[in-house]
Structures are given as structure tokens and as C-alpha cells.
Amino acid sequence: MIRFNVPYLSGREEEYLTRVLASGSFGGNGPFTRLSQRWLEERFGAPHVLLTTSCTAALELAAMALGVGPGDEVIVPSFTFVATASAFHRAGATIIFADVDPYTMTVDVADVARKLTPRTRAVVPVHYAGAPCAIARLRELCSAHGAALVEDAAQGLDCATGGEWLGRFGRFAAFSFHETKNLHCGLGGALFVNDPSDFERTEDIWERGTNRTKMFRGLVDKYSWVEPGSSFYPTELQAAFLLAQLESMDDNRLARMARWERYRERLSGGEREGWFALQRLDPADRSNGHAVYVMLRSAEACEALRLDLLAREVQAHIHYLPLHSSKMGRALGYEPSDVPLTEEYAPRLLRMPLHNELTLDQVEHVCDLVDDAFRAGRVR
Ligand SMILES: Cc1ncc(COP(=O)(O)O)c(C=O)c1O
């Protein structure tokens, strides 16, 4: 079976985990947490980075730091993972779902513009599959409108557009280090705090609502409860595992990009045949090769291709089910027709297996099987 994902290992995880075991200190916000945070700050020029237990937690931390609450509206794409919406919903905000640009499956800026109101507190776009959304235009729109821009960059680490790193456009940006991502620590995340004036409060919220980190820095004698907060950071074991992965970011990306480029080159033949479309990308953008998908002509063709590949021992997966027409989206008062392009395109998208253990021959094999499924008429 050609597996959809195999979690990456850099080879240095064990050494760093052994160091944590030898140190006898495991609880979090320790040396490996600080090293990982500094590594990310230096690489991406972020003023402050806080490690979190997940990207979901990073988005929740951003919602708390922004003080989002009842009466606020937060615009998110419907085509995304649950957390983009749930982090702001649980803070009490009204979730406004925006539609997708079907060529990129990132949020449609014109639809965001239409949905901005005086109550809009934040806009949370997603960089899908390692491709930037129209983030510079969203930044302009948010700043003209006084709304906070929070990037859901769960899949966007080490990507750039217009010469700027993803994660550096928003007031906050959330990343995922879940094992399905290019780099991971099992389950983990990070929040980029791009406005230095947000940092002090955000760090206190992150530290369970206390100023404990300031005590470590010698700024206060004793720590106490200073903010509403929660327990947001991972253990030192995860931070050490993550550092071993971060340090191999360049090698990891090279290997992944080789597979991703081979897929896109090979699958462009099927695109020319009119069987499906590939994600439309700006060649000037920097991708991290996170995912490759084909957009089929119908949901039925998508399911037929998925099953055809599975029967030939290849795991291909669909992705997000639209949030607005989910059980929770319906409970929030949405109808499927409210976000029509997402409803139409989400069930037509099929992701190909992609991970660094996949060989280029296996990529060729998967593409041969895709071609064969269409040529033999098993998928139309
Ligand atoms: C766009 C997006 N946001 C948030 C998340 C949540 O990430 P995590 O699993 O680290 O909480 C995911 C997970 O895949 C995602 O795809």
C-alpha cells in the first residue's frame, strides 16, 4: 500500500529526547521550548514566537489575546479545518463563513470584502496546501477596516509570497506541528506574535494567565494570576523533538519539493486532457510542497478515482468538508447554498499521497494509475 502520509523523522529526535531525559526537567517552557521559539524567530524574523500544544491551541490563544467575544464577527473560510472557526466560536464570536476561490481553494477576497461589517473583529484566512492565499490584499482590506488579520498557516511554514514569509502578514499567525505536517512533534503548534505590543499579554495568557515567565526573567519576585489564561504550551519532550525537526527544515523541504514538483509535472498531462485541474499557483511564490491535489469534474468522479486508486493500493484522500453545511454550521443557521462554491468544489478535491519516504518511482506509479483510470474510462 502506498500510504497517504508517513510522519517525517529527521534522525536527531532521539538525541534531543535523551537530553531531556537526562535533564530531569520535562514540564514545558524550558530550554528546548526557548530554543525552538528562538529558532523560528530568527528564521522568519518574527518578533515573538510561542510554542503551543497544537495549531488549534494557537488559534485559541490568538482569540483570547485579541479579546474576541460576544457581539464580534469573525470571518473565516468555510473550506478549512474546524479549528479556524471553533477557536473564535468558543470565544463567543459570530462566525461568518466566506467562500473559496476554486482555482486555489483559498478564501475569496471579494467575498471577504462583501462580508466585512462594523462588527468584524478579525479575518482568519488559510494558506491551503502550502500555497499562499491572497494575503497582501487581505492585509490591506483588514487594515482599512480596522479588523485584525490572523493567518491560519497550519500548512504554511517555510512558504513566502512577494518576498515575505507566510506568518508575518497577520497580527498573529498560527502553525501546526501535527504529524501530518511537513515538520512535526506528534501534536504541536506555534503562534507568531507579530505586533510586539501584543506580546506581554499574550505570553501571560499562554502561561496559564500568570506572569511566571516574567519571574524567570527577573522582572517580578513572585508570579501571580494577572489575566484570564490557560495552559497552552507543550512539554519539553515535544519541544526537543520539534527542534530536531526544525533544524532539518531545508533538507526536508528539498526532498518534499522534488516529489511535489514531479507530481505537478506529471499530472499537468491530465489537466491538459481536461480530466481535472491542479491548484493554480503563482510561480514567484515559495511553496513548501505540503500537498498536491486534483480537482475533478464532479464529486462522483472524485470518489471513483479515490476508490480506483485504493483498489490498486494507493491511499488518496479528500479534504475538508465545508464547515457551513456541517452539523455545527447548520446549527449556526447556515444553509448549504449560503457558501455555494465551497459546497460545489470541496467534494471534488482529491489529495495524492505525499511524504518524504515516497520515492520518485512511486510518484510516477501513482500518476500512471491516475492516467490509466481515465484512459480506461473507469473515471470520467
Ligand atoms: C487549516 C488548518 N487549521 C488548523 C488545523 C489544526 O491543527 P492542529 O491539528 O495542530 O490543531 C489544521 C489541521 O490540519 C488545519 O489544516
Image (cartoon, grey):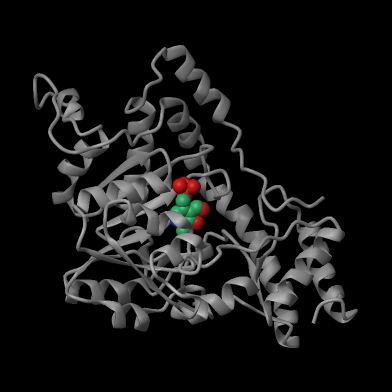
Query: Which of the 4 image quadrants contains residue 254?
Result: bottom right
Q: Is residue 69 above or below residue 162?
A: above
**Drawn side of residue 139 relative to residue 35, left or right:** left
Q: How many numbered dots are placed on residues in this image?
A: 0
Q: Quadrant of the C terminus?
A: bottom right
Query: Which of the 4 image quadrants contains residue 30?
Result: top left
Pick whichever, 10 or 70, lies toward us. Answer: 70
**Drawn side of residue 274 relative to residue 9, left or right:** right
Q: Is residue 278 above or below residue 224?
A: below
Is residue 281 visible from the viewing direction of this image? no
Pick whichever, 26 or 20, lies toward us. Answer: 26
Instruction: Tell me residue 218's x, y (percent).
Output: 12, 23
Q: Is residue 330 above or below residue 377?
A: above
Instruction: Tell me residue 121's x, y (percent).
Output: 21, 65
Q: Residue at x 76, y 65 (%)?
A: 306
**Drawn side of residue 308 relative to residue 303, left or right:** right
**Drawn side of residue 279 relative to residue 307, left or right:** left
Q: Residue at x 33, y 36 (%)?
A: 232
Pick whichever, 198 or 209, lies toward us. Answer: 209
Q: Residue at x 18, y 76 (%)?
A: 144
Instruction: Tell me residue 146's x, y (percent).
Output: 16, 70
Q: Residue at x 45, y 40 (%)?
A: 188
Q: Is residue 233 above or below residue 308?
A: above
Is residue 31 visible from the viewing direction of this image? yes
Query: Which of the 4 image quadrants contains residue 99?
Result: bottom left
